Image (cartoon, rainbow, N blue to C red):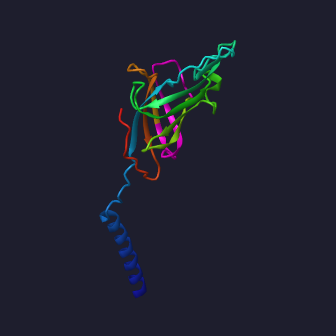
Amino acid sequence: MLARIVFCSAVLLATLAVILLALFSPLPKRKPSPPWLDLSLYIQQPQSPKIIDATSSNNNNDPVAQSSQSDGGGAFIFHRMLTEGPENTSRLVGKAQGFIIPVEHFANSGFNIIYLTFHTPQYSGSLSVEAKHVSPKDTEELTVMGGTGSFAFARGLAVFAQSIHGDATYHVKLQLRFPNNQSRTTTIPG
């Protein structure tokens, strides 16, 4: 009989201890979500002088080429500059390159990627921006799928808007998040 009393008392005390610990223990501290890195940049046409060769029939040095097909489809291949400001005299921070097929049945194609490459003292690396749903609108919200260098494993949003300031073609606003609490505190103003 004594053994039963000891056993029941032990079970009761253990149950009471678990309930009290659950009620009065402090809440675990949440890890703060990784900070967002906001960048504001401009995409511009490269300012290189055009060289005209009289002996050549191809005098087109335009860094954007459009390949058109008879069915109305086509592909856009481009090479542009990334600058801090909308003027063509703004500081160069990198380049924007891409290959986009704006045809509906190619919308999920792996080719529809815009690469933003950065060459600054603060940032060195690239970002891949997925351009699945590109349409002729003034503003496009695209997905940042990853990056290299300073932007390794970055995720976030890239908002491309037609620029109304200066010489820029597009104004790009990037909102990036990094895994493992990789803190990026420097921003490129814009």
Question: Which residue appears at 52% of the width and 40% of the height?
Answer: 126
Q: Position of residue 26 (x, y in %)?
A: 31, 62
- The question of residue 57 being in magenta is answered with no
Q: Is residue 27 left or right of residue 148?
A: left
Q: Position of residue 96 (x, y in %)?
A: 52, 31
- The question of residue 150 being in magenta is answered with yes
Task: From the viewer's side, name the closer residue of 29 and 190.
Answer: 190
- Is residue 1 visible in the rendered structure shown here? no
Question: Which residue appears at 49% of the width and 41% of the height?
Answer: 155
- Is residue 141 visible in the rendered structure shown here? yes
Question: Which residue appears at 69% of the width and 15% of the height?
Answer: 55
Q: Give the magenta part as a residue range.
A: 132-156
Task: From the viewer's side, name the closer residue of 105 and 38.
Answer: 38
Residue positioned most to the front = 54
148, above or below 21, in the image = above
Can you say which quadrant of the picture contains the N terminus?
bottom left
Q: Is residue 71 left or right of residue 175?
A: right
